[in-house]
Amino acid sequence: MSLKVLKIKLYQPFANFRKPFSYGVVDSYPLPPPSTVKGWLHNILGAKNGEYYKMAVSIAGKFDSTVYDIQKIIKFDRVRKESNPSSILREYSSTVISSMIYVTNLIDVELCIHVNSKPEILESILNNIYSSFWGLGRKEDLMRIDFVESIEAKTINYFEYMRQQLPSYGMYLKQETAEKFRVEGIKFRLNYKYEKTSDGLRVFTTKKDVVYVNSLNVLKPILTFDENVLVDDEGILIDLIGDEEYEN
């Protein structure tokens, strides 16, 4: 059995995939979450006015190290009793507060992303990916696309896969995949799909439970002999996360 997917390999010299609500430091996920990847792909597709394309993505990759830099941030807040009069913008009824904050940067990021969707959507991404200036993560995070091509992913027996030389990539596994293969890692509940409120705010109503493993070598033998996995032409495991009809 095979599945036609779009394979994208890219490199970032530095990146931050911000964890929401991280306190005291702008922390980063080890890989871009599905919402970030999906948002990037929608920008490539030119989606406008809430236009939504159903898809599922498999996210694998690695980074060399992390460093922390210091950035000055400026925040607008409501006027409080203790507010410094010199910081109050009276015409906006708010105060301006500046402070220093540490920011996590992943260095030498290599990503391998597989996308499953309708054939015409995959074709549109393939044709427009080099015309888009949108990147992954922050706007200042540069990105180099090293490979993009439609490939035939194949299903192989899990024991056969375990006998291969596995790529040195980490990845997000669906929680049920991690449980099936008895994999231990870092559990995340990641944003996936948002809805807009009446005042224009984006609220993520759909989330995905995943397990991050920093190496495919943590996969363990299982007792059943009939389990199969989906892999690409380099032997990279594919575990699609997204809209149900496109998950494997």
Image (cartoon, rainbow, N blue to C red):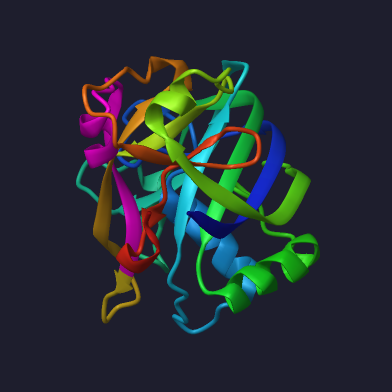
Residue at image coords 34%, 68%: 245
Where's residue 8, x and y in %? 66, 49
Depicted 9 relative to depicted 62: above or below:
below
Name the side, left or right, on which 16 lies relative to 172: right
Residue 159 at x, y percent in the picture: 40, 25
Q: How many marks?
A: 0
Left or right, 189 with respect to 40, comes to left
Above or below, comparing residue 240 to residue 225 in the picture: below
Residue 45 visible, this orientation: yes
Residue at the spot 41% in from the left edge and 39% down from the top edge: 229
Quarter assignment of residue 242: bottom left
Residue 139 x, y percent position in the rendering: 64, 50
Residue at the front extreme of this rendering:
225
81 or 117, nearer to the observer: 117
| Residue 238 picture location, percent across and down | 48, 42
Residue 137 visible in the shown view: no
Q: Relative to 226, is 34 above or below?
A: below
User: Does residue 139 belong to the magenta stretch?
Assistant: no
Give the residue drawn at x 56%, y 49%.
153
The front one of 130 and 203 is: 130
Write the start and end of the magenta stretch as one range: 175-194
In this rendered view, identify the residue nearer to me: 167 or 57.
Answer: 167
Q: Quadrant of residue 84?
A: top left
